[in-house]
Image: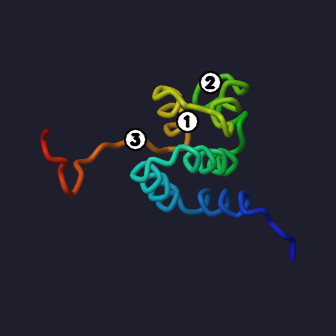
Amino acid sequence: MKDRSHDEAMAELFRDDPVTAAATLDAIFADGDQGELLVTLRQMTKAFGGVQAVAKAAELNPTQLYRTLSETGNPELRNLNAVLHAMGMRLAVEPLSRPIPHV
């Protein structure tokens, strides 16, 4: 049996189960952990054919996408939106279950 890295295993999971991929991103957005977001987006990029394929589908420069998804990356909203659309997903907003009191 061939050993797989964690990233490869996650990429396979995301490729085979887009509902899990979307739920994972949703949880990360709720937590607000940018580092985890970037790791997950890199794994998902691998699941959807790699940086070259995702960049082409998102109409982004591959070098720009590599930088955006790097450990020090800080994706702009338009790039994040483009990448998610290339993967068949979109951002969504919903109210908090417990609204923040007005100050």
Camera-nearest residue between 10 and 69: 69
Q: Where is 77 relative to 96, above or below?
A: above
Which residue is depicted at the point 47% across and 26% down? Answer: 78
Which residue is depicted at the point 45% across and 58% down? Answer: 23
Disc on the earlier residue, 2 or 1: 2
Disc on the earlier residue, 2 or 3: 2
Q: Where is 12 relative to 56, above or below?
A: below
The residue lying furthest to the bottom in this view is: 1
Q: CA distance from mark 2 to mark 1?
A: 9 Å
Residue labelled with disc 1? 83
Which residue is depicted at the point 51% across and 34% down? Answer: 80
Residue labelled with disc 2? 60
Residue labelled with disc 3? 91
* Label pair 2/1, CB-CB below 8 angstroms: yes
Q: What is the three-letter code of the residue carrying label 2? A: Leu
The residue lying furthest to the right in this view is: 2
Q: CA distance from mark 2 to mark 3?
A: 18 Å
